[in-house]
Amino acid sequence: MKWSIVIAICLATFGFIPGMGIPGGFVLMFGALVLEPIMKLGGHGLIVLTGDRGWPAALLATLIWPVFIPLTYLLCNRLCKDASAKKRRIVFACLLLVSAVITTAAIEVLARSEGGGVVQK
C-alpha cells in the first residue's frame, strides 16, 4: 500500500512540473476511448480534448488521477483476496481504466460548466 501512495505522489509531482501533463494526457486519452462513443450517441462530442482546452485538461488530470492509484490498489486487494497475481493485475488495470473514465468525465463536466458546452457534431 505504501508503494502505491509513493508512486501516486511521484506521478503527480513529476508528471505536472517536468512532464507538462503527459500522464494526464494519457489518462484523458484512455477515458476518451470509453466516453467518446457514449457522447456521440447523445449527439455531443468531448470538448476536453479540443482546441486550447487540451493542455490545461491534461495538467488537471495529472493532478487528479494519481489519487485513484492507492484507492484502486486497496479496492483491488479487497476484491481479489484469494485470487492469483495475474487476476489481480487484470482487475487492477480495469479499475485504473474506470478511474481514467471518471477523471475524464469530471473534467468534461467542469469544461462544459465554464461555458464551453456548445460543440459542433
Image: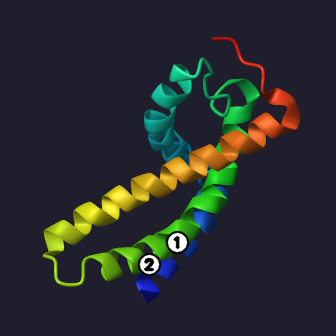
Query: Is residue 90 at least partly visible in the picture?
Result: yes
Q: Which mark is residue 8?
A: 1
Q: Nearer the viewer, residue 66 or 97?
A: 97
Residue at the spot x=53%, y=21% of the render? 40
Residue at the spot x=61%, y=23% of the render? 45
Horizontal placement of 41 versus 50: left or right? left
Q: Which mark is residue 52?
A: none
Query: Is residue 18 at least partly visible in the picture?
Result: no
When asked about the image quadrant of residue 91, the answer is bottom left
Q: Residue 58: percent from the left, percent from the top?
A: 64, 45
Identify whether 23 is placed above or below 113.
below
Horizontal placement of 116 versus 6: left or right? right
Residue at the spot x=63%, y=67% of the render? 13
Q: Residue 22: percent from the left, percent from the top?
A: 55, 47
Identify whether 114 is placed above or below 98.
above
Q: Nearer the viewer, residue 21 or 66?
A: 66
Residue farthest right in this picture: 115
Horizontal placement of 96 versus 28: left or right? left
Amino acid type, label 2? Ser
What residue is disc 2 on?
A: 4
Residue farthest bottom in this picture: 2
